[in-house]
Amino acid sequence: MDNTHRFSNRVDNYVKYRPGYPAAVLDLLSETTGFSPTWKVADIGSGTGISTTLFLDNGNTVYAVEPNDAMREKAAALLGSHPGFISINGTAEHTGLAASSADLVIASQAFHWFEPVAARKEFRRIARPGGSLALMWNERQVDSGFEKAYEGLLREFGTDYAQVNHSNITLKEIEVFFEPMPFQLKVTGNRQTFDWERLQGRLLSSSYIPIEENDIYKKMMEQLRQIFVTWQKDGVVHFDYQTKIYIARN
């Protein structure tokens, strides 16, 4: 599937059930780069606006660059009334932004969809001299019994999970992306809590998960239900994340 269209039938679940980014991200950026509410942010692969919201709420002007029509339109519906929100139909390799137009160029949960050489060139072009470049992920942990069981379900039923899982990205690939710029890694914690309904929505927000018309959908959901029943406590289960931010100076 063309990567720019993978999430077109997942938008509602994506908005409702994907994790946001903790406010601590703003503090880490400020400590590392001098980031402030006056900075203009280019949010590359902005999707439905999850990361965009973090910066808008901080007072930043945000260029939300997203090639998927359904996701971009959803972001515009949710955030379009915000004076700092600017929606851009573009890709990481061709954003459509002017040179030196952003103080921070960041990709959140999207780098693994990019062509890295062309994206690096574009990031550096649109960042002002002395501005910052960043890659950010909510990295789901696989430590608890529930998290391990859920990971097993993804590996069993995900159509191309092993190929598109962002955790496949190596430190070497990140070094190559930022080269010759030195970069820093900052880490903070994040958590999501799910009842049964929300856990279903979280699963179905992933582009590699079969939809209801698929023959294995019923078996997959039965297995998910068993995982939930086994590991729930007081009717909920948790995903713990490490929110990782790789930061460099342009």
Image: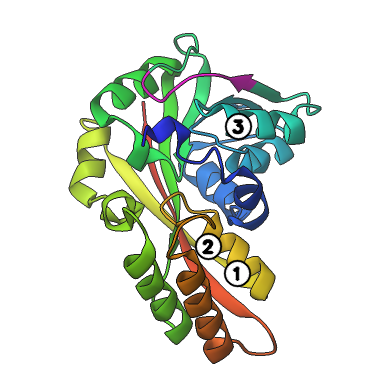
x, y (%) of residue 171? 23, 50
Residue 75 in picture, x, y percent from top left: 67, 33
- Within-10-Å neighbours for mark 3: few <14, some 14–19, many 20+: some
Please identify the quadrant where the N terminus is shown: top left
User: In this orientation, which residue lies closer to the viewer: 64 or 5?
Assistant: 5
User: Disc 1 marks which residue?
Assistant: 199
Answer with left or right where residue 6 lies relative to residue 20: left
Q: CA distance from mark 3 to mark 1?
A: 23 Å
Camera-side residue of 12 and 115:
12
Q: Secondary structure at mark 1?
A: helix
Residue neighbourhood size for the residue with mark 2, other residues' Cα within 10 Å, grouped as few (<14), some (14–19), many (≥20):
many
Labels in figure, total: 3
**Front-most of 112 and 37?**
112
Residue indicated by mark 3 = 70
Q: Secondary structure at mark 2?
A: helix
Furthest residue to the right? 81
Helix or strand or loop: what does disc 3 sit on?
helix
Q: Earlier in the sequence, mark 3 or mark 1?
A: 3
Asked if residue 37 shows in the view, the reply is no
Q: Judge the density around disc 1: few (<14), some (14-19), many (≥20) Cα neighbours within 10 Å.
A: many
In terms of image quadrants, where is residue 187? bottom left
Give the amino acid type for the residue marked by disc 2 in the picture. Leu
Tell me the amino acid under the disc marked 1. Leu
Q: Which residues are magenta?
A: 87-93
Magenta stretch contains residue 61: no
Location of residue 101 with respect to 244 vertically, above or below: above
Residue at screen point 44% across, 31% down: 4
Q: Is residue 163 left or right of residue 10?
A: left
**x then y, percent, for residue 50:** 62, 44
